[in-house]
């Protein structure tokens, strides 16, 4: 009799303990998911560089959109993109040893933007040169050559990037096309991500070829942690991709 009741007590204590930890873990889970769904918190610092442009030019409702992954053709060269805070500062393993972490995430985001964009009825596609180091930036297979041609035919070209961490980067924001008047899509994206001056660093290679650059945010802190954590990775990529697709949809539909 004594043994039975002792056992019953044990079970009782154990179940109280379990429900208590369950409640605690639920609370943690809820606060954590709220955390990763907060877009402004995820992208982190926004560019505070002085910029005065406003995109007011109308765009064709069925404008073809091309999404490029920054540094897809310049691995091992000067402009390979940022290794990110986790690898560079904390010594963690790169996501893929053959490419920078920035390109790894640029490619994931590119895929997600096109997938979500198609679901929302956008005239959208991606281009990936496949070859990871093309020495000549004017080679016909580079992001910039293909993007420039697409833009000259009336399309909107966006190359996605993550900025360098800490003092090496600026933060999130859009760099519009160097020679064109900024349009309503530029404005819509900039209203979510912030803006860089058009003549940033004297006009970069992409904007001089009518290719917009979107810096998602610095590859550091919460953004990078949520990307690296397999439990929050897909959700984080989708959250960012969805904001970009929404920016297009708000202007085009
Ligand atoms: Zn970049």
Image (cartoon, rainbow, N blue to C red):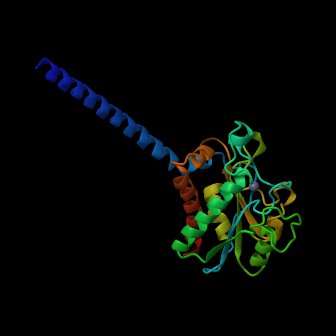
In the image, what residue occupies the spot 69% across and 52% down? 96
Report the image quarter containing ligand 1.
bottom right
Residue 227 placement (x, y as % from top left): 59, 49
Quadrant of the image containing the N terminus: top left
- Which residue is farthest top? 2
**Residue 76 horizontal side relative to residue 185, left or right:** right
Foreground of the two, 141 or 8: 8
Residue 198 placement (x, y as % from top left): 79, 61
Foreground of the two, 39 or 74: 74
**Residue 121 horizontal side relative to residue 134, left or right:** left
Residue 94 placement (x, y as % from top left): 70, 46
Residue 25 placement (x, y as % from top left): 39, 37
In the image, what residue occupies the spot 74% across and 65% down? 212
**Position of 229 relative to 127 (above/below):** above
**Residue 97 horizontal side relative to residue 116, left or right:** right
Quadrant of the image containing the C terminus: bottom right
């Amino acid at each position: 009799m004594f043994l039975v009741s002792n056992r019953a007590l044990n079970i009782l204590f154990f179940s109280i303990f379990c429900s208590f930890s369950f409640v605690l873990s639920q609370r943690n889970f809820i606060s954590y998911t709220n955390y990763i769904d907060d877009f402004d918190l995820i992208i982190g610092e926004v560019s505070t560089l002085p910029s005065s442009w406003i995109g007011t030019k109308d765009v064709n409702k069925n404008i073809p959109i091309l999404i490029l992954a920054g540094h897809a053709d310049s691995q091992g060269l000067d402009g390979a993109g940022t290794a990110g805070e986790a690898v560079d500062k904390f010594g963690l393993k790169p996501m893929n040893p053959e490419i920078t972490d920035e390109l790894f995430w640029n490619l994931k985001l590119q895929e997600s933007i096109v997938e979500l964009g198609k679901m929302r009825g956008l005239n959208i596609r991606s281009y990936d040169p496949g070859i990871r180091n093309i020495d000549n930036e004017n080679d016909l297979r580079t992001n910039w050559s293909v993007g420039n041609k697409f833009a000259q035919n009336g399309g909107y070209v966006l190359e996605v990037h993550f900025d360098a961490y800490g003092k090496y980067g600026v933060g999130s924001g859009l760099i519009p096309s160097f020679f064109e008047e900024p349009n309503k899509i530029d404005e819509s994206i900039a209203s979510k991500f912030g803006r860089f001056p058009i003549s940033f660093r004297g006009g970069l290679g992409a904007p001089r070829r009518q290719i917009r650059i979107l810096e998602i945010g610095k590859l550091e802190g919460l953004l990078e942690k949520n990307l690296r954590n397999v439990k929050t990775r897909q959700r984080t990529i989708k959250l960012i991709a969805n904001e970009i697709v929404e920016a297009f949809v708000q202007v085009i539909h």
